[in-house]
Amino acid sequence: MRASFYEGARRFRTGTAPEPSAGAGEALLHVKRVGICGTDLHIFQGHLDHRVPKGGIIGHETFAEVVEAPAGSGFEPGNRVVVEPIHSCGECRACKMGGYYLCYALKIYGVELPGGMQDYWTVPAVRMLHVPDTLGDDQAAMIEPLAVATHDVRRAEVKAGDAVLVLGGGPIGALIAMVCRHRGARVIVSEVNPFRIDLLRGLGLEVIGMDADPVRFVNEWTAG
């Protein structure tokens, strides 16, 4: 099968690798889509060499189809899935309290562990989520970053009628703005990159750029 291997700062190699076999509790997936996250760009630049092994396979924003799944897992061949890219020990205090995402030995698929930039991939079935047929493949590939944005908006307790300023219109910032808008909030995004400004406006978002003083603008927009 094909896979993309990290070979050091600014170097990847696309080559072949043996198809993995699913272990106990794991599913074998046929990867259909992989997003490129800001974390992946940091990996490419060599900033995470202390975490990413040479020859490692990155990619944690994934959409896939199930090839094999453990009995009783709730998944079967042909199911469309996304993966929560977290590997936890299940034994530490955080895990036993239900906070597996705070595991003392936490590892991330696509960082310390092999990620989705390969044709076939094995992951624990407990880290998979069903994707409804109403979502296209490209849309499904956005579920992981959209989950990040949705979590942020929930933590901020944004509600209808709120005035929200999003500082920075990168992928997560844009998604946060869209989730806030969906909740009925008034949203402004502050951004300086012309490409991002055009993209944000193309999504129907209001943007303030280099030509505006964001502090003055927001004070006027919110009546102080």
Image (cartoon, rainbow, N blue to C red):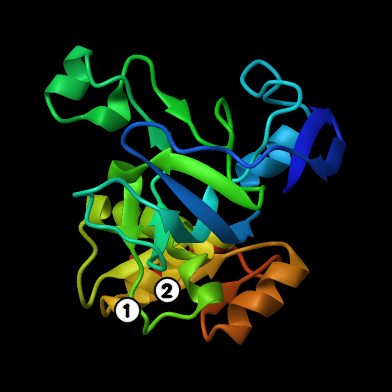
Residue 224, percent from left and from top: 33, 65
What's under tag 1, amino acid-wise?
A: His
Nearer the observer, 56 or 104: 56
Residue 110, percent from left and from top: 58, 37
Choose top left, top right, bottom left or bottom right for residue 129: bottom left
Q: Is residue 222 visible?
A: no
Q: Which mark is residue 73?
A: none
Decide: few, some or many residues near mark 2? Use Cα within 10 Å; few <14, some 14-19, many ≥20: many
Choose top left, top right, bottom left or bottom right for residue 90: top left
* Element type at mark 2: helix
The residue lying at 69 percent from left, 37 percent from top is 18
Q: Is residue 35 above or below residue 217?
A: above
Q: Is residue 188 visible?
A: yes
Nearer the observer, 208 or 57: 57
Q: Is residue 44 above or below residue 106?
A: below
The residue lying at 35 percent from left, 77 percent from top is 181
Residue 161, percent from left and from top: 22, 77
Q: Which mark is residue 182?
A: 1
Q: Which mark is residue 178?
A: 2
Q: Is residue 51 left or right of residue 157?
A: right
Nearer the observer, 158 or 88: 88
The residue lying at 52 percent from left, 86 percent from top is 204
Q: CA distance from mark 1 to mark 2?
A: 6 Å
Residue 60, percent from left and from top: 54, 46
Dots 1, 2 in contact, CB < 8 A: yes
